[in-house]
Image (cartoon, rainbow, N blue to C red):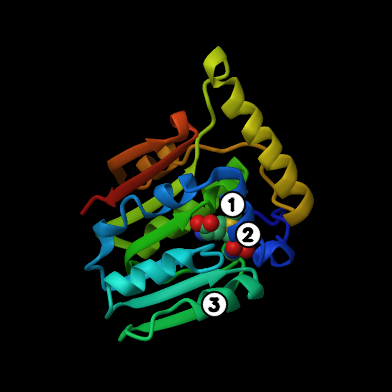
Amino acid sequence: MNNRARPVAFCRFARAYNVLEKLVFKDALEKTRFAFLDSISEAKRILLLGEGDGRFLAKLTSINSNCLVTVLDASPTMLALAKTRVPATFLGEIHFCKQDATKCTFPFEAFDAVVSHFFLDCFTEETLSALLEKLSSTLRPNGKWLIADFVEPSPNALRSIPQFLCLRILYAFFRLTCGIEARRVVSPHKLLRAHGLSESRCISFSKGLLASLVFIKQA
Ligand SMILES: C[S@@+](CC[C@H](N)C(=O)[O-])C[C@H]1O[C@@H](n2cnc3c(N)ncnc32)[C@H](O)[C@@H]1O
């Protein structure tokens, strides 16, 4: 575990998160977030990391109505919002955990699916390396890991300048308002491959600024 990871403060921003997102990105983040929702419609035990205000939880629990979900987020306000979004038709069980994912331990091979949307991009490579090791081991063999995130553009491509500037502004904003430690998006591919996961699905949005991915843990 990286002891230098700073506590994050998404609470002040939680209620405005959805509106701000739509103002800046319209529906692009929603498309990225839900692109591969179908691939865990039959998973039984699901871990949602840094779930935020619960929009993914709402859709998941409406299409997979009898699963066991663990929702982990460091922000109590985000968790409170997420609780309000669970449909009355949901028959499964949900555990809401207010915890710092970088500091907690996860049970071995306990989940069929892990979802980390717009969450891994909050961390530096050092923190991410320790976090992905723990999270890989909590996923069962053949389990799926869904990731929606921003993508750093290639530094030499002139056509990527708008995406590059957009990311720098976003990082400045989230560092200032929420205290995230990262300054850029660290690609999780290499670290996940090292822990026995391989990419099975991928789709890009907003000219490559956003990507939705599914990784599978080898049996
Ligand atoms: C950028 S928001 C993403 C929210 C949501 N998953 C989405 O798709 O928009 C990051 C979320 O991760 C949570 N978070 C950030 N660092 C965390 C940590 N170390 N442990 C647990 N949750 C954390 C924040 O509270 C926030 O809800």
Foreground label between 1 and 3: 1
Image quadrant assignment for residue 189: top left
Ligand 1 picture quarter: bottom right
User: Cα distance, mark 3 to mark 2?
Assistant: 20 Å
Q: Earlier in the sequence, mark 1 or mark 3?
A: 1
Q: Is residue 117 visible?
A: yes
Specify the amino acid type for callout 3: Cys
The yes-or-no answer for disc 2 within 8 Å of ligand 1 is yes
Percent across and percent down for residue 129 are: 53, 46
The residue wearing badge 3 is 97
User: Cα distance, mark 1 to mark 2?
Assistant: 6 Å
Percent across and percent down for residue 48 are: 44, 66
Q: Earlier in the sequence, mark 3 or mark 2?
A: 2
Residue 1's place in the image compared with 188, above or below, is below
Q: Check disc 3: other Cα within 10 Å, few if <14, some if 14-19, many if 20+.
A: some
The residue wearing badge 2 is 17
The residue wearing badge 1 is 21
Specify the amino acid type for callout 1: Glu
Residue at image position (67%, 62%) is 16
Q: Nearer the viewer, residue 157 or 59?
A: 59
Residue contact between numbered discs 1 and 2, judged by CB atoms under 8 Å: yes
Residue at image position (31%, 48%) is 215
Q: Quadrant of the C terminus?
A: bottom left
Q: Is residue 93 left or right of residue 141?
A: right
Q: Secondary structure at mark 3?
A: strand
Residue contact between numbered discs 1 and 3, judged by CB atoms under 8 Å: no
Specify the amino acid type for callout 2: Tyr
